Image (cartoon, rainbow, N blue to C red):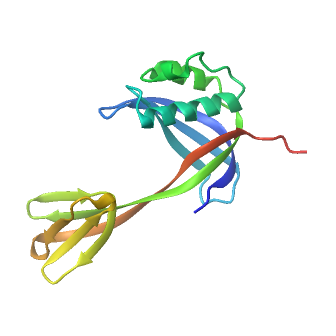
Amino acid sequence: MPPRLVRAVFDRVEPVYGEDGVGVELGFLTTAARIETNRIDDFADLGPELTVPAVAGIGKVLRILRAARIAAPRDPHALAGRVDEASALLTRALGSRLQLEVRPRSRVNFTAWTESGVETVSDVADVEEGDTEYLVTRRGGRFPVRFARDAVVRRVTETERWFEVVGVERAESAG
């Protein structure tokens, strides 16, 4: 599906320090959009080391700064792992009117309550219901997960939907 253009105001930046990495959560309030939400939340991965996701996250931060007309650091790669510095720069951009290019994303999760506990399988491609088992195949060619039907007390398949920001420009003034 092609990206959609959405006008929004940049209204939130939160530093994130997690086990899997660090970055900043970004929040946008849509002002003129033909999408089913009035908020778009996104994440810019900043490392802690210079990896492909971190370079993409740094790029997202730089595009917001450019659209808000805030000078970027001389060496943008130095933002890798430096969440506080990136947050401080982005805080200066709060209130900026932007035109976002967003792409709809989704993820399917399968949760099974069994006699031995609760198990969740993420990034599900398909769930086949057989006579004796549930076969849950996952995206990316990862191994399938099997659940014996007689051991499953309850099950649910959920779809998580969101919009990923893939482009940021300064919103042109109307009129």
Residue that protrudes farthest toward the bottom in the picture: 131
Res 1 quadrant in image: bottom right
Percent coordinates x, y for residue 138 in the rendering: 29, 62
Image height of 162 relative to 100, above or below: below
Res 89 quadrant in image: top right
Image height of 131 relative to 54, above or below: below
Residue at 57% across, 31% down: 61
Residue at 62% across, 35% down: 11
User: Foreground: 100 or 91?
Assistant: 100
Q: Which image quadrant: the C terminus?
A: top right
User: Foreground: 26 or 39?
Assistant: 26
Image height of 14 relative to 152, above or below: above
Image height of 109 relative to 172, above or below: below
Percent coordinates x, y for residue 98 in the rendering: 70, 40
Number of numbered discs overlaid on the protein picture: 0
Percent coordinates x, y for residue 50 in the rendering: 41, 27
Residue that protrudes farthest toward the top in the picture: 74
Q: Is residue 31 left or right of residue 1?
A: right
